[in-house]
Image (cartoon, rainbow, N blue to C red):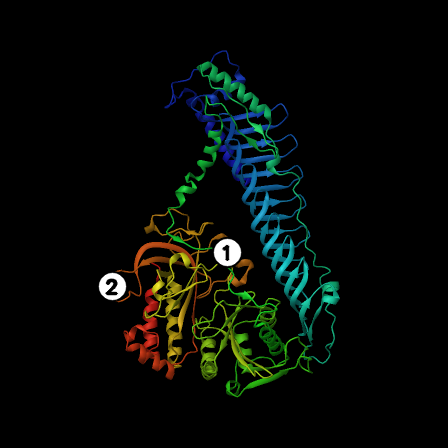
């Protein structure tokens, strides 16, 4: 940066020297020619040139009475262009100026040897920039008002390194910290400390996954030792608040008892976060010399007096924080506020108003789905039973899982029953709930599925068995099933009917074979199938399946659609004003066509065909494509701005050549957050084209006509509800509805016809982005 700026300054000086004579002779195209007074002193030549009515940019060198020095471009009475300002205390700025403000790219150096190179806005370090401290620490990333804010990385003098999000000068959000000795932390931060969900990994192989508070484990978490043993429970620095269960490894020499307080006293003793270097004085606190302003005011008055002007000029004053302000209350002249406005208005040649046309799509602010199941909730005890059962099923010792399963593992009779008395037993802990029985269906198969889907057992337990483990969705689905979400949105739990369990167990061998063969499959990922049987008079059985949530992402889902390819009853009957981001819209509500990049579109078509062939072979129907959209160009008020060429919008877009690409911010997130890696159906950059249906059609138009209005989006999609076979109830539904409407428009049809209609519809909604 410094070499570039020095080169610019030298090149400009050379140009000025060559053209100085011509400029002095040139007439203004706006005003009559100005003639200099022969009695003026030579020292005022440069100032006379700048104060002429042409307002030409000139080159000056000024030494002020307080010892400050400036050299560079000058406009009227301000530094303007490329210039260097050296304060008497040794601080120096070299870079771009606009109307007396440091605006644009520049380099600020301190007497201590510290430097900042990057973007400035009105004397503040603001934008992208690199700070190198006097002790050797280096920060490279985003700044707001002199403070690290946004994405950035810092190398500390002791060899530590941090890469992640910042807020007001401290680590805040998601980030990764690596110590010189090889230990590292990946997770959430708050005010420079570990806070929220995170993972600490030691070089010796030990690992903690769970909740943190003020830099220490606090709440639900799992500590795994390098020997294979692990501890699951509630963590606290206070031993009286610590509770949990220790699971020793299968090794004969492993200890059967372990004190979790060793994590606080030993493991974390050398995991201290290095503090950031304090900036001695910020660029915005440096004051430009008042002498130059007084000299310029005298010069301005002298020039105006020669031209007979009556306009009075007032000097600029220094604000408390060192920034310069322009003010003139005289109505007889334009004052200096005009210069300040033009400094902001001319930046980049585009104002904010020119970037956006009036938005055509509006979205509401997202809300957290569901109600947290806390004490007093009608399903609170059921949630406790589920947590205890999951912790027992996943945490108990088991032989090494192989992906090559025997046929006996899929036997419908392959079940494991466990009794959970309230007082506890040899294999189960005591608990505050009533006694219940727990059933695992085909445990070896689902253990293999979790391994196939790369689900860590400890992470799985933390997600489901946390303090706020489940949130119940506001209303059950059409099938009568209830849905629950884990606190981190990773997993969804659905209650099931006995008939659905039978269908699932029957298709489980083919499902396992399919998902193992096709890594990019779009069908729902299942992680467990269980049953809770309450004791007592009720003898109630609750069966449920645990599956992945495709909308688990740091991107906010603004619109979601459930698409089947049928028209009968396939709309939400909600006015636009009542549609929330959590509202699931249907086929006749769809007003977009989704454009995928060529390589992604080809893989999408292949995978949809494979998945539909699998479902058709298993006699499954009534499934749907669940689609979620995140609009990239949104305003704080919820307005979405088109970005396509046909819309006529001029907003900057991440799709310069029509193909989806990630912005720099997205790339930063991908580096520090593996959950945002792109795969088929997850975090995919794409474009959505607005589509309109014809209103004069006798039958509902399933896919509207493209309008050419394009939106940059991140899209999520997957095939859900894959446990409904074409049984007698669906055949009767088909016969009954066929008597009242077109048989091809209803959802309940033969699996072969359903698969054909579904593919044709999906391949009209998803197209290649050309």
Query: Who's the residue at 50% across and 35% down the image?
Result: 8
| Residue 179 x/y as whole percent | 66, 58
Where, by quadrant of the figure, is residue 757 drawn?
bottom left
Total labels: the figure holds 2
Query: Who's the residue at 47% across and 13% down the image?
Result: 37
Does 382 sit above or below residue 10?
below
Disc 2: which residue: 697
Mark sitting on residue 12: none
Q: Nearer the viewer, residue 571 or 521?
A: 571
Does 300 sit above or below residue 483?
above
Q: Secondary structure at mark 1?
A: helix
Does residue 323 appear in this view?
A: yes
| Mark 2, other Cα within 10 Å: few <14 / some 14–19 / many ≥20 | few
Q: Nearer the viewer, residue 253 or 710?
A: 710
How far apart in space, not on screen, are marks 1 and 2 (Cα)?
Answer: 45 Å
Q: Secondary structure at mark 2?
A: loop
| Residue 148 x/y as whole percent | 59, 47
Does 410 sit above or below residue 631?
below
Tell which tag, 1 or 2, sits nearer the viewer: 2
Marks 1 and 2 in Cβ contact (< 8 Å) = no
Does 713 sit above or below residue 348?
below
Taking the view exactly as shown, the residue that stands out farthest to the top is 39
Image quadrant containing the C terminus:
bottom left
Image quadrant containing the N terminus:
top right
Q: Nearer the viewer, residue 568 or 396?
A: 568
Does residue 45 appear in this view?
A: no
| Residue 10 x/y as whole percent | 51, 32
| Mark 1, other Cα within 10 Å: few <14 / some 14–19 / many ≥20 | some
Disc 1: which residue: 667
- Relative horizontal placement of residue 99, taking residue 291 as reference (left or right): left
First in sequence, mark 1 or 2: give its number.
1
| Residue 458 x/y as whole percent | 61, 71
């Amino acid at each position: 940066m410094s070499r570039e700026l020095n080169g610019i300054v030298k090149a400009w000086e050379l140009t000025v020297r060559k053209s100085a004579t011509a400029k002095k002779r040139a007439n203004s195209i706006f005003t009559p020619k100005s003639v200099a007074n022969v009695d003026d002193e030579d020292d005022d030549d440069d100032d006379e040139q700048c104060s002429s009515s042409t307002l030409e940019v000139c080159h000056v060198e000024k030494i002020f009475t307080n010892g400050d020095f400036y050299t560079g471009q000058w406009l009227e009475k301000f530094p303007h262009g490329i210039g260097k300002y050296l304060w008497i205390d040794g601080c120096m700025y070299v870079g771009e100026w606009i109307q007396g403000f440091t605006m644009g790219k520049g380099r600020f150096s301190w007497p201590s040897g510290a430097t900042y190179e990057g973007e400035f806005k009105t004397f503040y370090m603001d934008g992208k920039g690199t700070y190198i401290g006097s002790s050797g620490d280096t920060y490279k990333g985003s700044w707001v008002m002199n403070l690290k804010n946004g994405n950035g990385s810092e190398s500390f003098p002791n060899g530590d390194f941090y890469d992640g999000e910042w807020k007001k000068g401290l680590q805040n959000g998601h980030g990764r910290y690596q110590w010189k000795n090889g230990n590292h932390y990946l997770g959430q931060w708050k005010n420079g400390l570990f806070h929220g969900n995170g993972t600490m990994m030691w070089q010796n192989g030990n690992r903690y996954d769970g909740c943190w508070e003020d830099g220490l484990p606090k709440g639900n978490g799992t500590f795994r030792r390098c020997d294979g043993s692990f501890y699951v429970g509630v963590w606290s620095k206070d031993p009286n608040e610590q509770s949990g269960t220790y699971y020793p490894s299968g090794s004969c020499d492993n200890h059967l008892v372990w004190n979790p307080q060793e994590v606080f006293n030993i493991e974390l003793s050398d995991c201290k976060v290095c503090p950031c270097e304090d900036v001695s004085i910020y660029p915005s606190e440096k004051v430009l010399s008042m002498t130059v302003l007084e000299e310029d005011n005298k010069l301005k008055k002298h020039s105006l007096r020669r031209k007979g002007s009556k306009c009075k000029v007032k000097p600029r004053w220094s604000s408390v924080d060192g920034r310069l302000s322009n003010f003139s209350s005289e109505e007889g002249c334009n004052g200096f506020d005009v210069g300040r406005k033009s400094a902001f208005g001319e930046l980049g040649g585009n104002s904010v108003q020119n970037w956006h046309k009036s938005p055509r799509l509006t979205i509401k602010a997202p809300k957290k789905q569901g109600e947290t199941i806390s004490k007093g909730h009608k399903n609170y005890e059921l949630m406790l039973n589920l947590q205890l059962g999951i912790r027992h099923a996943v945490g108990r010792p088991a032989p090494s899982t192989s992906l090559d399963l025997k046929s006996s593992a899929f036997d419908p009779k392959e079940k494991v029953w466990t009794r959970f008395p309230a007082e506890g037993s040899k294999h189960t802990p005591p608990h505050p709930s009533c006694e219940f029985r727990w059933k695992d269906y085909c445990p070896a198969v689902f253990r293999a599925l979790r391994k196939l889907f790369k689900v860590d057992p400890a992470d799985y337990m933390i997600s489901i068995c946390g303090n706020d483990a489940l949130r119940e969705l506001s209303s059950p689905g059409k099938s009568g099933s209830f849905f629950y979400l884990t606190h981190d949105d990773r997993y969804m739990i659905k209650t099931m009917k006995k008939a659905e369990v039978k269908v699932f167990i029957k298709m489980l061998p083919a499902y396992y074979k399919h998902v193992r063969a096709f890594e990019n499959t779009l069908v729902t990922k299942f992680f467990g199938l269980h049953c809770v049987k309450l004791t007592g008079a009720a003898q109630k059985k609750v069966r449920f399946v645990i599956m992945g949530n495709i909308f688990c992402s740091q991107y906010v889902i603004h619109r979601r659609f459930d698409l089947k390819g049928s028209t009968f009853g396939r709309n939400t009957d909600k006015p636009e004003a009542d549609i929330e981001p959590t509202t699931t819209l249907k086929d006749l509500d769809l007003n977009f066509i989704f454009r995928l990049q060529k390589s992604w579109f080809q893989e999408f078509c292949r995978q949809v065909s494979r998945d539909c062939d699998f479902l058709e072979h298993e006699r499954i129907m009534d499934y749907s494509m669940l689609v979620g959209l995140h609009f990239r160009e949104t305003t704080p008020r919820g307005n979405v701005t088109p970005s396509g060429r046909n819309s006529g919008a001029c907003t900057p877009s991440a799709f310069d050549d029509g193909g989806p690409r990630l912005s720099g911010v997205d790339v930063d997130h991908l580096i520090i957050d593996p959950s945002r890696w792109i795969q088929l159906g997850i975090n995919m950059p794409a474009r959505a084209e607005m589509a309109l249906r014809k209103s004069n059609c006798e039958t509902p138009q399933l896919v509207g006509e493209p309008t050419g209005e394009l939106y940059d989006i991140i899209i999520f999609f997957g095939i859900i509800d894959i446990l409904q076979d074409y049984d007698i109830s669906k055949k009767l539904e088909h016969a009954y509805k066929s008597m009242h409407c077109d048989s091809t428009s209803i959802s309940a049809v033969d699996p072969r016809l359903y698969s054909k209609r579904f593919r044709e519809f999906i391949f009209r909604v998803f197209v290649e982005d050309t």
